[in-house]
Image: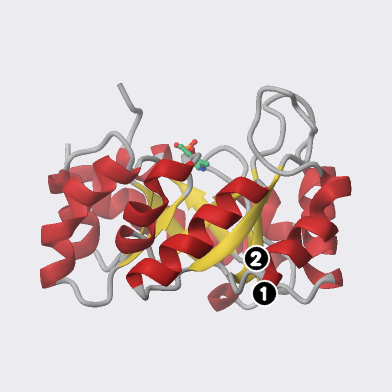
Amino acid sequence: MTTGIASNLETVRQRIIAAAQASGREPGSVRLIAVSKGKPAADIQAALAAGQNIFGENRVQEAKSKFSELRAVSPGLELHLIGPLQTNKAVEAVRVFDVIQTLDRPRLADALAAAIKKTGRNPLCFIEINSGEEPQKAGIAPREFEGFLAYCRSLGLNIDGVMCIPPAKGDAAPHFMRMKEVAERHGLTHVSMGMSHDFETAIRHGATEVRVGTAIFGARP
Ligand SMILES: *Cc1c(COP(=O)(O)O)cnc(C)c1O
């Protein structure tokens, strides 16, 4: 259903503008990441044709196979990894992605540092924080953030943001507030938070990147 994508995108863009303005922010300070995981290349092409050029994917292999051709014809395209990354895929991830949002443990930092050395590519990285301290979720524990940030920087990683997925239940606002606070305290530019169901709340609390899939591309199988 590629036909609905352009109008869905327009609706999401308008909602982003409205949410930004309602909290006294510049609409241009919020970047929309279209999450195309599980969706075919045709859907991505429809979004590109509608002026969207930042995309998020969860898996290295899927992103590589869908985006390598699209990249060749869309020079402005920017690709973010938003799913968990295994250390043995670090080299591939560094080659495929412009931004890695899910840096969440020392061993992965080591693997990325080695991958950067090997490939000569140095993608921007965000540190994923497990803001709700949920055992089943990825992300560094909030109390370990500061030490982890220092470690990543000592390896030469290009860290300039945080990312979180708050608990599915309950109010996300306190999590979003804490993320913004952490970013500000450490001088980090990017705060990636907010999905289809809560991106307006995230914008109200200072998100600079919102990751929206379903509201643009429809439900995933
Ligand atoms: C799938 C996913 C999204 C997009 O979720 P929607 O609810 O479809 O907007 C955002 N962030 C992450 C990390 C995801 O895995």
Comes first in the chain, label 2 or label 1: 2
Above or below residue 171? Residue 56 is: below
Secondary structure found at label 2: strand
Q: Quadrant of the C terminus?
A: top left
* Few, some or many residues within 10 Å of mark 2 (<14, 14–19, 20+): many
Residue in the image at 18% along x and 66% along y: 71
Label 2 belongs to which residue? 161
Do residues under tags 2 and 1 come within 8 Å of each other at their CB atoms?
yes
Image quadrant of residue 166?
Answer: top right
| 83 w.r.t. 45: above or below | above
**Residue 77 placement: quadrant:** bottom left
Q: Given the image, on which type of amino acid does mark 2 rest?
A: Gly
Q: Nearer the viewer, residue 65 or 176?
A: 65
- Residue 110 sits in which quadrant? bottom right
Q: Which mark is residue 6?
A: none
Q: What colouring method underlies this structural image?
A: secondary structure
Residue 102 x, y percent position in the rendering? 56, 49
Cα–Cα span, label 2 and label 1 = 6 Å
- Amino acid type of disc 1? Thr
Task: Tell me if residue 14 can be seen.
Answer: no
